[in-house]
Image (cartoon, rainbow, N blue to C red):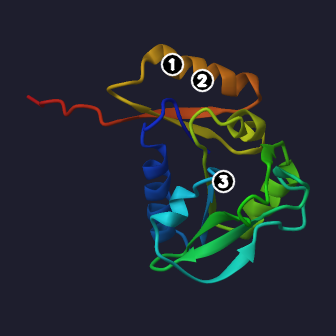
Amino acid sequence: MVVPITPGAGASFICARLAANAARESARPVWLFDLDFGANPQSTRTRMNGAAYSADLGAERFWRTEPEGAGRLALRKVDAAPVLISVFERDPGEVRRVTFASAPAYWDRVRDACGLALIDIPCDSPAATALCADVDGVILVGDAKTTTRAMADSLADEIEHAGGEVLGVILNRAPEQATR
């Protein structure tokens, strides 16, 4: 799971690059779950083709909609790589609210179905703490200009308190250091 510490930290970019690099190294497809269900930025900036595959997987889902059953999570193949990106599909006005909940059996099925699953979480989303105990680890992403160590420590503590394991922090846009 990739979680931004501050808005605009570049977590979605990092997640997309991790997916592309992993796809080149793996014999199995990479799945990138975009949990910004309102905008789905991962899918809107990527060329995708072919059929949509249901991300339901026959297990208890990690997302709930009001009204129940409104919208669906689909996986679509990226045009130039063995990467599938999730898209939350719904008719305008169909979904009043989306919530996230722990669903370990769902993520077990995902692990069995692909080479690597990456989860792109929007900043301040409750999905981070709802799902962190179900995944293998969390990478925090900060912006060198706006993120403080205290902010990173606070989010790491929140995730660890919810049962997640923080694997590390990527500090994006750090100034280059001159080497001697």
Residue corresponding to mark 2: 155
Q: Earlier in the sequence, mark 3 or mark 1?
A: 3
Q: Position of residue 118 (x, y in %)?
A: 60, 54
Report the side of 43 relative to 143 (left or right). Answer: right
Kind of residue sitting beneath label 2: Leu
Q: Is residue 155 above or below residue 8?
A: above
Q: Position of residue 34 (x, y in %)?
A: 61, 55
Instruction: Indicate which label's residue lies in the foreground, 2 or 3.
Output: 3
Looking at the rendered structure, the number of numbered marks drawn on it comes to 3
Q: Earlier in the sequence, mark 2 or mark 3?
A: 3
The quadrant of the picture occupied by the N terminus is: top right
Kind of residue sitting beneath label 3: Phe
Q: Residues within 10 Å of mark 3 (few under 14, many from 20)?
A: some
Which element type, helix, strand or loop, lies under badge 2?
helix
Residue corresponding to mark 3: 37
Q: Is residue 110 above or below residue 28?
A: above
Q: Can residue 18 be seen by looking at this rendering?
A: yes
Kind of residue sitting beneath label 1: Met
Which element type, helix, strand or loop, lies under badge 1?
helix
Which numbered marker is on residue 112?
none
Give the CA separation, mark 2 to mark 3: 22 Å
Report the side of 24 relative to 179 (left or right). Answer: right
Q: Residues within 10 Å of mark 1 (few under 14, many from 20)?
A: some
Give the CA separation, mark 3 to mark 1: 25 Å
Instruction: Indicate which label's residue lies in the foreground, 3 or 1.
Output: 3
Q: Residues within 10 Å of mark 2 (few under 14, many from 20)?
A: many
Which element type, helix, strand or loop, lies under badge 3?
loop
Whether the residues at callouts 1 and 2 have beta carbons within 8 Å, the answer is yes
Q: Can residue 28 be seen by looking at this rendering?
A: no
Q: Position of residue 127 (x, y in %)?
A: 71, 40
Q: Quadrant of residue 146?
A: top left
Residue corresponding to mark 1: 151
